[in-house]
Amino acid sequence: MKLIDSHMDTNNAIISIRDLKKSFDNNVVLKGIEVDVFKGENIAVLGRSGSGKSILIKIISGLLKPDSGTVKVLGKEVNKLSKKDLQELRLKIGFSFQSSALYDSMSVRENLAFPLVRNKRNLKAKEVSAAIESVLNDVGLSQTINQMPSELSGGQRKRIGIARTLIMKPDVMLYDEPTSGLDPMTCIDINNLIVKVQDQYNATSIIITHDLTCAKATSDRVTMIIDGKFLKPGTFDEIFNNDNEATKSYFNYNFINIK
Amino acid sequence: MREETENIELIQKKKYIISKQLDAFFSGIYNVYLFIIQFFKEAFSPPFEFKELINQCYQVGCKSLPLISLTGFITGLVFTKQSRPSLSEFGATSWLPSLISIAIIRALAPLVTALIAAGKVGSNMGAELGSMKVTEQIDAMEVSGTNPFKFLVVTRIAAVTLMLPILVIYTGLIGMFGAYLNIHNNELTSFPAFINSAFNTISFLDIIASISKAICFGFTIGVAGCYQGYYAKNGTVGVGMAANSAVVLSMFMIFMEEMVIVQIVNVFR
């Protein structure tokens, strides 16, 4: 993890969110999210199920449109981009889905090649193969290259999902519950991989999780969605020792002795 | 007084339910209309997904051949067998080839092929896209810079629209072959005599009408399957519902279209 205090100038933010609101019918989920995420920083977003964590990163990636507010990624306002510009921006954003979202009908090799072949059409077959081998090495799963997603374990699927985003060398990584449904040892592997991605790819990451171990191990700053708004981001310890009642009850409920 | 109030409340409730169902029905039609408009927009704007289109044509066309062959052959054979007693009562079994060719080319080949395709291809599309939707694979495709509508929907609808006419011609030929075997076995009709008798009664309009029907049916199967799958929700239950609705909707629409096209063709006959 990196100390990035010196870069924490709002103008340098890679992701900048202002007064973001989103509701579904009468259910107001996000009530004015404000946050800046800086170059090379990992920020974890905690919160109860249904608090709008996944909605937030879907808005950042342009999969959902906000009701109001602005979301800027790499200086571009996501919801004002044309379809073509949004597709270009998305090439710089990696999205690791909670369900891994590997294409069932394709092998691991084809899954990894898919974004590369479709977006960099002038690449030669050798270059594609080299890129696939490289990211598979990074996630430590070279042996799975010819396997189908159905033959992989949950942890392997998550790592291949991350590898599929890394192959495009993204500037921004969005992780949706990267450790959910995994055993503690595999969780540690995934946490290490997230830190490795930060170090090796210098990616700016938002990690949506309710796994406190993951938040502590992978993030420079942590925040929490409480009643549709962000708690002021701070280090894990600052948030852990926060006086806010909602934070206290959340941490007590997840009665893990993080310290 | 109390009874009257309860009656009014009941009527209001029923009115509310009916208006909600009507609302869902009409908004459903409107959404399908938007879906079709989007299909045409995406289909005729670059980049074109030729590789995936060929892959889908293979999936729809080649992989349906065994089932279509068997069904077409049995249809021709059984229809001939069932028609013979009626014609033999009038000593008109020599009309069998003409009767069978009219029945197969005008109605049976397009209808049987479309119904088989609705069951096999339509349900497959509904289930495949539905499961991709609920497991976020479509979202994953979108965030990786690929237009999922163009890649998944346009190619599938185009493939089934292109392949169904070919399958219909194939079914027609196989059906006629089944009919010929039965007629040859019973009436000892030679192959040239059968062909001569069968195709003398078939006009160019019949063939054009059949191919037009096949194009309409194919497009309908593609739209129904892809629409149901692409907008599937509620997890695995939703996937099952998408596959089921794709088949039911496309079969219903095929019969409706058959009725309309027959009326239109009769105007020109």
Image: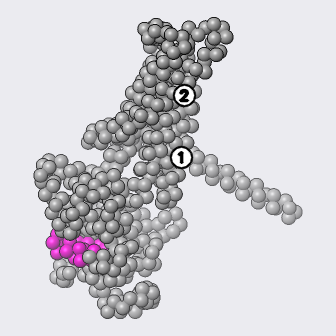
Q: Which residue is painted at 17% across and 75% down in the image? A: A199
Q: Which residue is painted at 48% across and 58% down in the image? A: B236
- Residue sticking out furthest to the right: B1
Position of A230 relative to B171 (above/below): below
Position of A256 relative to A111 (above/below): below
Position of B23 relative to B158 (above/below): below
Q: Which residue is painted at 52% across and 18% down in the image? A: B182
Q: Horizontal placement of A195 versus A157: left or right?
A: left
Residue A145: image location, x then y, percent: 22, 59
Position of B111 relative to B81 (above/below): below
**Residue range corresponding to the magenta coloring:** A190-207
Q: Is residue A225 visible?
A: yes
Q: Is residue B161 magenta?
A: no
Q: Label 1, on which residue?
A: B245
Q: Amino acid at mark 2?
A: Glu
Residue B142: image location, x then y, percent: 32, 55
Asked whether A212 or A134 is in front, the reply is A134
- Are the residues flagged by discs 2 and 1 from a single subunit? yes
Asked whether A34 or A51 is in front, the reply is A51
Q: Amino acid at mark 1?
A: Ser
Q: Label 2, on which residue?
A: B258
